[in-house]
Amino acid sequence: MSAPMEAKTVSQSRTTQVQIVLAEHINGMGRLFGGKLMEWIDITAAAAARRHSGCNVTTACIDRLDFTTAAFVNEMLVLEAQLTYVGSSSMEVRVDSYAENLDGSRRHVNRAYLVLVALDAQGVPTRVPRLIAQTQEEADELEAGAERNRLRKLRQYVSKEKA
């Protein structure tokens, strides 16, 4: 029998990625293409999940993706990821995206919640460390993540029943 895994804090896997928005990232309306932002979100979430689990991961679902405002050419896009909930092999990751100007001012562009699954060397889901919240904000997010997880399982059950 293997030794129990050591729990990890939210801060141990927190990840930040920075991209400069280039002309090739822009859609026909002159804004950052949503699909490009989704790609960057997925990569940033995966990095945070890998840091927490110590494993390769795969994206199981994007639970929520809210666009609040646009980003434009030559702005820096700052993506900040942190774990908000863990199950036995799954991890919920919140990614907040900000457009940053040269003066350092930021505006919130996007918030996304993704669920990623840790995989062992054979590509089979494997257990992940528990998540420890150190601040009230992290504790609140952990509680909300547990509720989102419950609702995801309920939606999966209802979908199976209809099939």
Image: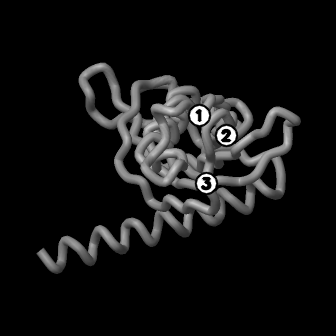
User: In terms of image quadrants, where is residue 124?
Assistant: top left
121, 107: nearer the viewer: 107
86, 50: nearer the viewer: 50
Residue to which mark 3 is pinned: 70
Compared to residue 140, the image places residue 73 above or below, namely above
Compared to residue 57, the image places residue 145 above or below, namely below
Q: Nearer the viewer, mark 1 or mark 2?
A: 1
Secondary structure category for the residue under label 2: strand
Residue displayed at 40% across by 25% down: 56
Mark 1 → mark 2, Cα distance in angstroms: 16 Å
Q: Earlier in the sequence, mark 1 or mark 3?
A: 1
| For residue 119, side relative to residue 123 (left or right) | right
Mark 3 → mark 2, Cα distance in angstroms: 17 Å
Mark number for residue 80?
2
Q: Residue furthest top?
A: 121
Secondary structure category for the residue under label 1: loop
- Identify which amino acid the numbered label 1 is placed on: Val
Q: Position of residue 150 (x, y in %)?
A: 46, 68
Whether residue 76 is visible here, answered yes or no, is yes
Crowding at label 2, few (<14), some or many (≥20) Cα neighbours within 10 Å? many
Whether residue 89 is visible here, answered yes or no, is no
Residue to which mark 1 is pinned: 21
Crowding at label 3, few (<14), some or many (≥20) Cα neighbours within 10 Å? some
